[in-house]
Image (tube, rainbow, N blue to C red):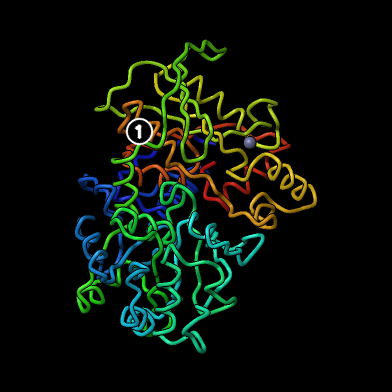
Amino acid sequence: MKHIEFTATNGTFDINDFINRCDAATMGEELPPAENQSEPQEPIPAAVPVADGVDPICYSPLEEVLEELRMGRLVLMTDDPHRENEADLICAGQFATPQNINFMATHARGLICVPMAPERVDALGLPMQAQHNTEKHHTAFTVSVDAREGTTTGISAFERSLTTMKLADAKSTLDDFVQPGHCFPLRAVEGGVIRRAGHTEGTVDILRLAGLEPVGVCCEIMKDDGTMARLGELGSFQREYGLKACSLAQIIEHRQHTEKLIVREEVVKLPTDFGDFDCYSYHSKVDGKTHLALVHGPIDPEKPILCRVHSECLTGDVFASRRCDCGSQLHAAMRRVAREGGVILYLRQEGRGIGLSAKLHAYKLQEQGYDTVDANIKLGFAPDLRDYGVGAQILRDLGIRHLRLLTNNPLKIQGLSGHGLDVVEHVAISIPANTDNQHYLDTKRDRMGHLL
Ligand SMILES: [Zn+2]
């Protein structure tokens, strides 16, 4: 295995090109030249997502989009090009007029849904549609509803408008609705876009920012040929109907700047077998957990800092399990950071975010022949639930702005660069495989895009 180093400039990063280049490198080939890398480009600010295509959307400052929503108008909201790569039409639930619903049904033609703040779903006592959510992006549908009073079939724009406005009304109770129905409430994740960068959370968060009820309407945009419109194809749609647009990244960035989601609790000396560190503990308001940062040497915001973002793996980190390579990766990173200076960020998100007990269940499935990706899917989890919003705030709190990221996982780069951190370089950690984890490492490389 050859040690490889890459430069991934924020904004010009192409994940597929990146993986291909790394695959070639690990197979001992010479790296093909990266495309469009001849001239260094200005990094695009995190708030503007990369939308490939001939007809991209034009984004407005967030304040203008908030004002549109307060006026009861529809706006476009885009997610990450690497996620769904879709724009949804959204509006406030309290302004879900028959005209707005009819516009969505006529021109957007996706599924009209009602994203709701979790406390509003709980206050109504709406049950979830699926006990075990196995949907790819964990879209959290509750049971569908219609307003009990004033509806006949529930499907006309007028009746869906009525049901949605009732859902947005804090005084409504479960008795005001019948189930099932023609409106599809979605339960946003606690913590919003900081925890999950999806349209459900984005809609609720932006309505809160606008000072409106945290219940909205969203609808994906389908093209005439029946396929979903991608970000790079929606410019003319936007211009035709005079729609303002924002991205989830803009909302994340706004919240990162205006809200402090982590609290620095303690700084202690931590001498280790691998070198001496200052150990910072942080309490996260998002997940209630204590995360650690081990720092060696000074941190200069102007300079790229060598950084390992490590997700907790009890069996690998503590027991030196040979089922994975986490322990060896952590220790190799600690050795390197102790030598060159930098940070080990230790996030308490066990088993790619599924938790210890679920991870052991997944191990059992693997013993029965599933690989690590299939085992998680079988248990009802997305292949990788880890999120890096909290980690990004900790890195920023430590004064870090530019990273040289020690990782074999390109998803981490996407996860962090949306949060106002500039990943200037990817530094691979090379760990020799052993007989027990060869299959696991093959799976990480072949199915999860890891660079091994
Ligand atoms: Zn592990």
Residue drawn where x is 31% and y is 29% of the image: 304
Front residue of this view, candidates 228 and 396? 396
Q: Quadrant of residue 30?
A: top left
Front residue of this view, candidates 36 and 234? 234
Image mark count: 1
Front residue of this view, candidates 389 and 307? 389
Relative placement, left or right, of 52 versus 187 is left
Q: Residue 388 appears at what percent x and percent y?
A: 45, 41
Quadrant field for ligand 1: top right
Residue tagged 1: 403
Front residue of this view, candidates 284 and 400? 284
Image height of 5 relative to 247, above or below: above
Residue drawn where x is 73% and y is 37% of the image: 436
Residue drawn where x is 51% and y is 80% of the image: 182
Q: Secondary structure at mark 1?
A: strand
Quarter that holds the C terminus: top right
Q: Residue 9 appears at what percent x and percent y?
A: 30, 44
Image height of 41 relative to 56, above or below: above
Q: Residue 8 appears at what percent x and percent y?
A: 34, 43
Q: Quadrant of residue 358?
A: top right
Instruction: Determine if residue 3 is in view.
Output: no
Relative placement, left or right, of 104 versus 114 is left
Task: Name which residue type carries label 1.
Answer: Leu
Image height of 324 relative to 179, above or below: above
